[in-house]
Amino acid sequence: MKQRLITAVIAGAAFVTLVIIGEWPFTLLMIALASVAMGELIRMKQMKLLSPMSFLSFILMWLLLIPEKMTSLEWLHVHKLELFLLLIVVLLALTVVTKNSFTFDDVGFIVLASVYTGLGFHYFIYTRFLDDGLFLLFFILILVWSTDSGAYFAGRSFGKHKLWPEISPKKTIEGAIGGILVAFLIGITYVLFVPIFDSWFITVLFIFVVSVTGQLGDLVESALKRHYSVKDSGQVLPGHGGILDRFDSLIFVMPILYLLGLI
């Protein structure tokens, strides 16, 4: 418990500081976190980290992750998305070249893992550099953290009905509802001091979407770990597991907010 608390304080303070600083330090942090998270997925799959396939996995992820303004592929006369699709074709061709020692399932894993981590962390960067990005990103962080805390304490105090025991045996329906209620309590308090949206309808919708999809993102990572029979995604954060264990909710929330036009 002491180790967990120390890690939370140090890592949390460093993360918040870089969020506030923004610019290159924050962008480099997101690239580093996404790269570690991709490595965690590769290890779950039991692929060799130092291999051509892993290298291609990182390339695909970085293509989605790094903002357009930071990379220029004009010398290749190709757009980043076109290169992404071309590399998928190369991966599919490798299933033939390797006589299925590298399989279609491996291709699917690499593509989906790169999209999962690449786009998730990409929209961190995207949101931070919006005009009101600092306050908006803090709003999202506060909502996710308050949902997690509310779900934990509500589940411990009132939890009786399992939410999805096949995926996450400890989570309860009461905990999930408690997480949403706490997110609304903390979220409404935040916007009273730091107005984010002009409409209360959008504010309420935003809080609900973040709280619900954040919990869904947590379940997605739980399903992933259960599938690969691992307890934690990694050990980079003592007492807390890996980067995916800490950012599973957030990297699921960010693309959904973008797709819904809420960021």
Image (tube, helix red, strand yellow):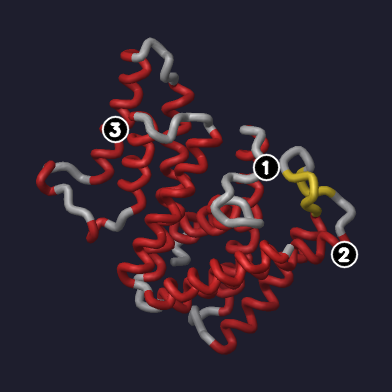
Whether residue 217 is visible to the viewer of this picture, yes or no, is no
Callout 2, which amino acid?
Answer: Ser
Amino acid type, callout 1: Lys
Give left or right: position of 153 versus 226: right
Q: Is tag 3's residue or tag 1's residue first in the polypeptide sequence?
A: 3
Residue shown at 29% from the left, 26% from the top: 90
- As measured in the structure, the alpha-carbon distance from the residue carrying label 3 to the one carrying label 2 is 50 Å
Query: Relative to 92, does residue 169 appear above or below in the rendering?
Result: below
Outermost front residue? 3
Amino acid type indicated by mark 3: Leu
**Residue 145: percent from left, percent from top:** 63, 67
- Of labels 3 and 2, earlier in sequence is 3
Q: Is residue 116 left or right of residue 178?
A: left
Q: Which residue is mark 1?
A: 231
Residue wearing tag 3: 87
Q: Residue at x 87, y 64 (%)?
A: 157
The quarter of the displayed image where residue 144 is located: bottom right
Q: Residue furthest top?
A: 99
Left or right: 108, with 11 as reference point: left
Measuring from the top left, give residue 163's x and y in whole percent.
78, 49
Q: Nearer the viewer, residue 195 or 44?
A: 44
Q: Nearer the viewer, residue 6 or 114?
A: 6
Indicate whether 20 appears above or below 5. below
Distance CA(mark 1)–CA(mark 2): 24 Å
For the residues labelled 3 and 1, the Cα–Cα distance comes to 32 Å
Residue 95's disc is: none
For label 2, the residue is 157
Looking at the image, is mark 1 or mark 2 earlier in the sequence?
2
